[in-house]
Image: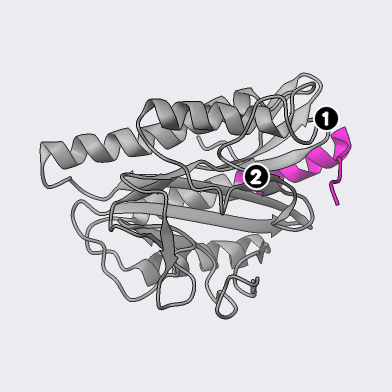
Amino acid sequence: MIELRTPREIEEMRPAGRFVGEVLTAVREAARVGTNLLELDELAHRMIKERGAESCYIDYHPSFGAMPFGKVICTSVNDAVLHGLPHDYALRDGDLLSIDFAVAVDGWVADSATSFVVGTSPTPERAAADEKLIRTTEVALEAGIAAARPGNKVGDISAAIAEVAHAAGYSINTDFGGHGVGRTMHGDPHVPNDGRAGRGFPLRPGLVIAIEPWFLETTDEIYTDRDGWTLRSADGSRGAHSEHTVAITQDGPIVLTARG
């Protein structure tokens, strides 16, 4: 069911959005060469406890997960792009890390993701390829947000994202994409990263959605790691992921998870 939020409810969602941004900023600052992924999860877990928030991940067990997730952030490294389950791994120089985080504050959920290179890429070519991939997800996110206006449709967001990806030479997997956000982390409507403009659910004031472009360097095929959660590229190429929770208002989109 698709739910529309009142202006007051959107204001009530702002603290969750701000907190998600704060946690992602803190985790990014802590993600240095030698930092263990479990340390990053512990940092996020501690911040959740101190804030009195509620993790959306730790007990999450959808049909595509082998068991309850058990951690509070997703840490996807290099060829992993989504749902990366934190494990005993120390970050290495040049790793491409994607962090995804969703949490509820006072009963309202916000969801956001960011990707970046840890330390220094080993070669100029690798650095350029990583920068292009990450930046393309960011530009695609910006394009999707710009299309999230009353009078448009979900397909306009999807088409805007796809246009950026295809122009950069990336193919698109539509198995996972954006979604409605509110009292729960995943709701309707589904917001794929490719689609036809002018098609799909009409965008109305009060709709709150997570828009999340994610691309792989040289494929659009993925598989699930043996951990039962982490999604990796079929050919070993790197992935990147950018996401914001966005409220659609009469005056245009509001990014609830903006980071300072």
Magenta region? 1-18
| Left/right of residue 9 with respect to residue 34 in the rendered view | right
**Classed neighbour count for the residue bearing mark 2: other residues with Cα under 10 Å, few (<14), some (14–19), many (≥20):** many
Q: Position of residue 123 (x, y in %)?
A: 10, 42
Numbered circle sitting on residue 160:
none
The dot on residue 204 is 1
The quadrant holding residue 169 is: top left
Query: How many marks on residues?
Result: 2
- Position of 12 with respect to 30 (left or right) is right
Q: Is residue 12 magenta?
A: yes
Element marked by disc 1? loop
Q: Nearer the viewer, residue 51 or 160?
A: 160
Q: Which residue is mark 2?
A: 17
- Lower sequence index among marks 2 and 1: 2
Left or right: 56 in relation to 70: right
**Kind of residue at disc 1:** Arg
Q: At 73% across and 49% down in the image, what residue appears?
A: 181
- The structure's colour scheme is one colour
Q: How far from the left and from the top, in percent, is residue 121? A: 17, 45
